[in-house]
Image (cartoon, grey):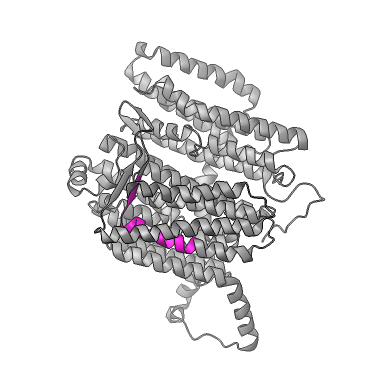
Amino acid sequence: MELVLQIFILIPLFGFFLSLIVPETKEGFLSWIAFVTIGIQLFLAIVYTFVWLIKGRPSVNFNTGDLYQTEGYSFFLSFYFDKISAAYLLVGGILVSLVTRFSRYYLHREPGYKRFFNTVLFFYTGYSITVLSGNLETLFVGWEILGICSFLLIAFYRNRYLPVKNAVKVFSIYRIGDVGILLAMWMSHHLWHENITFQKLNNFELVHEHLLSHSSTGVFIAMMLVLAAAVKSAQLPFSSWLPRAMEGPTPSSAIFYGSLSVHIGVFLLLRTFHFIEQQTSVRIFIGVMGLVTSVVATGIGRVQSSIKSQIAYGSIAQIGLIFIEVALGLQNLALFHFAGNAFLRTYQLLVSPSVVTYLIREQFYRYSPDDKSIESKYPTKLANSLYILCLKEFNLDNFMYSYLWNPMKVLGKKIHFLSLNKLIAFFVPVYLLGIVLWFYQANFSEKIIHILPIVFSIFGLLMVLKAFTERFRARMSWVLILLNHAWVALAISFNEHFSLSHVFLYLGGIVIMGLLGYFTLQRIKNLEGNIDLDRFHGHVYEHPRIAFAFFIACLGVSGFPITPSFVGEDLIFSHIHEDQILLALLTALSLIMDGLAIIRIFARVFFGPHTKTYHEVAYRSS
């Protein structure tokens, strides 16, 4: 039964590659590939689950073997199947097959028809990897695929301003969750001294023994997992991204943000529950967060004028209740609640265009005022205050901007004086000096060697902050992103067991993809003349192949699992010591800003309304 788990991954992956070579004009064949691929996997999942139930529901675990191993570290893919995987796999298969069938007619003759089905098949591959993952490393592969597919589907109508802007906003929130997973993996290596699998986490005695002697470490890992889950499932204070994600086509809204992707945070908590269940303070925090989110999201949803936003906040409120069920240890109820909420939200979103028509008709011909609601019993000032707060969505967007993104933008603008010539004149000699210090580190005191990684990490963070706030020179911003990775590698090199081979593993893919990205930007510069970052250019319409090449480069530089750099990122964190919390935070922050700067360049240069007047331009707001 172990080998069958890999087939669940290979089937949608094969369908994805097959759909890439089909011409866009073959709409029927494209939708047929998607429907048949997902249908075969669903049939196989039903048969597999039936056999699994007959055999007494054993936990099935399969490891691929070490893909990369060094002293104290091993990277391998692991797959795991139990009742949680069964529920998510079956629900996902049913809903994706229904949505692909619906989309065949809904998106007929849409310019992005092929793009939609390519992305859905890629999404389902990532979803299958996530729900069948047997360790955090494997889960992170699927997690990253879900994130990039979200960006592509939110920005599906890429000739409009608002969908592209909201896609970048959602991706920026997702990066916080990505770093939560990375930090959880980092500290897990120090707690377990191995690449721990979810099957071992189910061992109560093993977990209890480690938490007794490392309680603070356990709390840190648990809180990072909760952070990642809260981001992915749109819990407070990250709830505002979900309604913005509804800018994509209705089928993608249904499958992503109504049913499957938005419940992956719940999956993460369920999968790691045996680690969290012995930490009462963390469980209380999860329950309180879910309760507050449910109350706030219910209020916000009641004042929304858009039916998609109402459904989004309704889904957020229900997921908050599922968080409470997980905190109480009601795993079976949480799984049942997930399935019910997923089916309901998918149905609501798919029929939402028709519902709008029905409601307009009712307002014209059969209008009758609603009965008094519960709010009418509140004091007038309280009711009005709650109404304004809900109407402004409790200022959740302003909160994120004021306390997260704006401080970084301000800091980045403080170093606006940097230019490519100044970088070469100052930072390149400093970097070479750092390499010399690394070769002769045995001649310096431990205090100096302990400070140097922090200093170099700060240099790297300054590089990527400048790249994030750069508004004019796209190529310079890209070079700064590459320099950030170089500084990170230099900073970690001062820790023991991090050899030159590890540096080459981490930087090898980044250098190759970095050169590809630079040359594609140079090609666009030569063809179009202007690729400043102060506006959207929309060059994908006339240069789709260049846009695709640059997109691949973006994935490689950001550590997406298509280059060895993905393993290198995990390797870097495994070599950061347990007491080097500041170094870990600086590295994590660099990776957050790295992804944001990369996706910002891609969106500004290739997406949005086209700069040329002979192309059709959509309205600013959709």
User: Residue 127: horizontal and vertical position, in percent?
Assistant: 45, 52
Residue 450 image-quadrant placement: top left
Closer-to-camera residue (532/337): 337
Residue 501 image-quadrant placement: top left
In this view of the protein, can residue 416 be seen by the observer?
no
Determine the residue positioned at 37% across, 67% down.
337
Determine the residue positioned at 51% across, 52% down.
123
Q: What secondary structure do most residues of the magenta stretch adopt?
A: helix
How many numbered circles does the render carry? 0
Q: Is residue 369 rendered to the left or right of residue 86?
A: right
In the image, residue 150 lies in the stretch drawn in magenta:
no
In this view of the protein, can residue 245 be seen by the observer?
yes
Closer-to-camera residue (343/270): 343
In the image, residue 83 lies in the stretch drawn in magenta:
yes
Determine the residue positioned at 49% across, 51% down.
12
Closer-to-camera residue (525/135): 135
Is residue 455 placed above or below 87 in the rendered structure?
above
Closer-to-camera residue (601/541): 541
User: Residue 449: horizontal and vertical position, in percent?
Assistant: 37, 20
Quarter holding the C terminus is: bottom right
User: Residue 539: horizontal and vertical position, in percent?
Assistant: 72, 44
User: Residue 397: horizontal and vertical position, in percent?
Assistant: 53, 55
Look at the image and give the residue range highlighted in magenta. Answer: 79-96
Is residue 43 placed above or below 181 in the rendered structure?
below
